[in-house]
Amino acid sequence: MNDTLGTASGIVPAPIARQPWEMLIPVLLLTLFGGLVLYSAGGGSMEPFATSHFIRFAVFMVMTAIIASMPREAVRVLTYPAYLLVLLMLLGVEVVGQVGGGSQRWLEFGPIRIQPSELMKPAVVLAMARFYETLPAGMIGTWRSLVPAGGLIALPMGLVLMQPDLGTSVAIAFGGVVVMFLAGLPLWWFLLAGGGVIAAAPLVYFFALHDYQRARVTTFLDPENDPLGAGYHIAQSKIAIGSGGIFGKGFNEGTQSHLEYLPEPHTDFVFATMAEEWGLMGGLFVLTMYGMILWWGTKVSRESQDRFTALLAAGATATIFFYIAINLLMVMGMAPAKGIPLPWMSHGGSSMMTNMICIGLLMMVNRWNQKAPRRGLTT
């Protein structure tokens, strides 16, 4: 529609008009709004958060445009090598990775610092979509549709759990499992796996989790038990969100973040920082922008004309959804506290990179869809 209007009027050049502005505008607005919140979180200053936030977005927007322009056959050829490269980077983390916050998650190449586990989220989605594209339809429902795909998920999960990073490993699994489900694997397999996870939960809690991870679970179940200790983050987040009311306290007028009651007001708890100053109206604006982005991603998947593009778009959308859902549930005390930033609002390069890669993949599939002949989804 944008393309037609732009070409007909002659006012907007066709390359600009054909861009998916129904998604790009919400992303831009969220980034700008996030910059305002980070300006406030920085004490009314562009430094140290807001400036780098905008610079990262600009840099990753170039990367997104490059991904969006990639041809279909090149992506198909490069999918497995890209997955293998990121897997080797995860192995490299275990050997020479940098330690931060008690975890070993980064590789450093001079001034460049990369978190390979973030790259693995879209890499897994790509590899899974490619695998199910090449799998004959008659093998869906057999072990051949489960075991190789399970290996593609389990290998990076195991390496990420060694860092240790439970949240990222779950995010990797989430994107992969969504692709498996949409590929048509039997529902009872997922129900059986879910039952197994529930049954194994007590064993995992007592024997596999670290002490700080168990503390997060117990705090989630009973946040009032230790409000000055393990439950402090969630308690202060709830206070900040609740104190904002309908319209908030006003821009740069938040007390929870400015007086440093709210931990990590620029990263994990940026939504609480926003809600205190912008209130319910600010929260509804943010949710509406995210809803528009996810709706567009779902539409791209539905309009895809082959299995590979449909699964790729769905997996990329699911990855973005995971970030949004887990962060919002966490700041409202409905999920255990975990370092999952809020897309396009939190200050963090790794998470923005991952979400911009997903946006690039969606734009790439959308471009392919526009050029593809209309036909039924191939199986």
Image: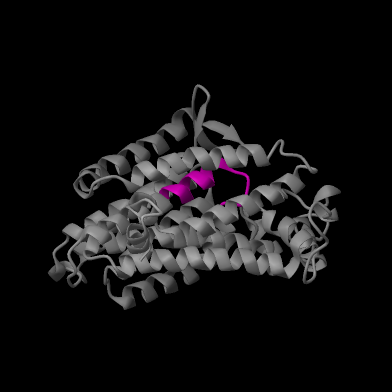
Q: What residue sits 31% from the left and 65% below the top?
A: 180
Q: Judge whether 123 appears above or below 139 on screen.
A: above
Q: Magenta part of the protein: which range?
A: 344-357
Q: Judge whether 235 appears above or below 263 on screen.
A: below
Tell me where residue 51 sits by quadrant: top right
What secondary structure predominates along the stretch shown in magenta?
A: helix
The total of numbered circles placed on residues is 0
- Determine the residue located farthest toward the top in the rendered image: 110
Q: Is residue 202 magenta?
A: no
Can you see residue 331?
A: yes
Q: Position of residue 157 (x, y in %)?
A: 42, 50
Indicate the quadrant containing the C terminus: top left, top right, bottom left or bottom right.
bottom left
Indicate the quadrant containing the N terminus: top left, top right, bottom left or bottom right.
bottom left
- The one of 176 and 39 positioned closer to us in this rendering: 39
Q: Position of residue 125 (x, y in %)?
A: 35, 55
Q: Position of residue 28 (x, y in %)?
A: 54, 53
- The one of 118 and 76 positioned closer to us in this rendering: 76
Can you see residue 266?
A: no
Q: Is residue 210 left or right of residue 118?
A: right
- The one of 86 and 74 positioned closer to us in this rendering: 74
